[in-house]
Image (spheres, grey):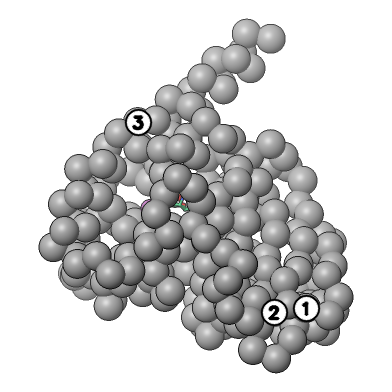
């Protein structure tokens, strides 16, 4: 038997493109091109691309837990470990200032989210470029996404274009018009850190109510794009 899901989660039958409704139509403009800006409180802001290929490749199977209460089990990801990326590229080339441990991910679609460095250094946190043996595509975060299984889905930034290392939260807010309190400082699934301040008895049913329409918008935007491409 499988271990129980984390508190407040239920299994969803499929793993679909998902996200906040406002991002449904903001498809990543260059899913085939990987360029990663590294900046923030660092001595040398740099752009990384080919260097990622020099890191050890790893695969892992992990469950995925969206903050809106659906989960999907046993996804197979591959890519590189965030900790290898941090130690071999960020520390050596970008050189973060002391205490630059508030990390911001920015996606090609304008999405952004924060993570704490100590959480990113866990062994199961990947910068992934494949899912179940295939490219991530427009649905799942090409060219590169974060996979942080111990953290809610919204922390698993897709279509990553930039990673920033800051000494504090001042240079960041969760994407407008969504309230900044939706971005919990840790977002750990086992501790049910869904959002700041708001109690889970309030968030669970509210988010669960909103999830189907977000999923539908996300799917319709991909279908519209595919229809446009088959027209031309
Ligand atoms: N760039 C970007 N990353 C994102 C999102 C998004 O809309 N844009 N949505 C987040 C949310 S809320 C979830 S649950 C997961 C969904 O991942 P999936 O689309 O591969 O299912 O991506 C997260 N990362
Ligand atoms: Mo999510």
Rendering coords of residue 108 (x, y %): 65, 46
Q: CA distance from mark 2 to mark 3?
A: 36 Å
Residue 62: give x, y in percent of width and height: 41, 66
Q: Is mark 3 within 8 Å of ligand 1?
A: no
Within-10-Å neighbours for mark 1: few <14, some 14–19, many 20+ = many
Q: Position of residue 129 (x, y in %)?
A: 63, 56
The image quadrant that residue 213 belongs to is top left
The residue that mark 2 highlights is 86
Q: Residue at x 56, y 56 (%)?
A: 112
Q: Are marks 1 and 3 in contact (CB under 8 Å)?
A: no
To which residue does mark 3 refer?
216
Q: Is residue 88 above or below residue 70?
A: below
Residue 153, label in figure: none
Q: CA distance from mark 1 to mark 2?
A: 13 Å
Note whether residue 85 is visible.
Answer: no
Q: Is residue 22 above or below residue 38?
A: above
**Nearer the camera: disc 1 or disc 2:** 1
Q: Mark 1 = which residue? A: 42
Considering depth in this image, is 148 or 172 the residue closer to the camera? 172
């Amino acid at each position: 038997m499988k271990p129980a899901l984390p508190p407040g989660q239920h299994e969803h039958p499929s793993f679909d493109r998902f996200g906040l409704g406002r991002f449904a139509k903001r498809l990543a403009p260059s899913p085939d091109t990987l360029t990663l800006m590294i900046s923030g409180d660092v001595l040398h802001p740099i752009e990384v691309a080919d260097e990622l290929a020099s890191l050890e490749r790893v695969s892992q199977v992990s469950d995925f837990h969206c903050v809106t209460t659906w989960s999907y089990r046993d996804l197979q990801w591959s890519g590189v470990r965030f900790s290898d990326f941090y130690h071999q590229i960020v520390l050596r080339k970008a050189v973060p200032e002391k205490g630059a441990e508030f990390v911001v991910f920015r996606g090609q679609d304008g999405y952004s989210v924060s993570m704490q460095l100590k959480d990113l250094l866990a062994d199961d946190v990947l910068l992934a470029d494949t899912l179940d043996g295939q490219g991530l595509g427009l649905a799942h975060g090409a060219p590169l996404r974060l996979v942080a299984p111990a953290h809610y889905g919204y922390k698993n930034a897709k279509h990553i274009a930039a990673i920033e290392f800051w000494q504090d939260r001042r240079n960041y807010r969760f994407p407008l018009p969504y309230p900044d309190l939706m971005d919990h400082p840790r977002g750990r699934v086992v501790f049910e850190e869904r959002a700041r301040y708001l109690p889970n008895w309030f968030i669970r049913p509210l988010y669960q109510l909103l999830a189907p329409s977000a999923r539908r918008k996300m799917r319709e935007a991909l279908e519209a794009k595919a229809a446009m491409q088959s027209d031309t």
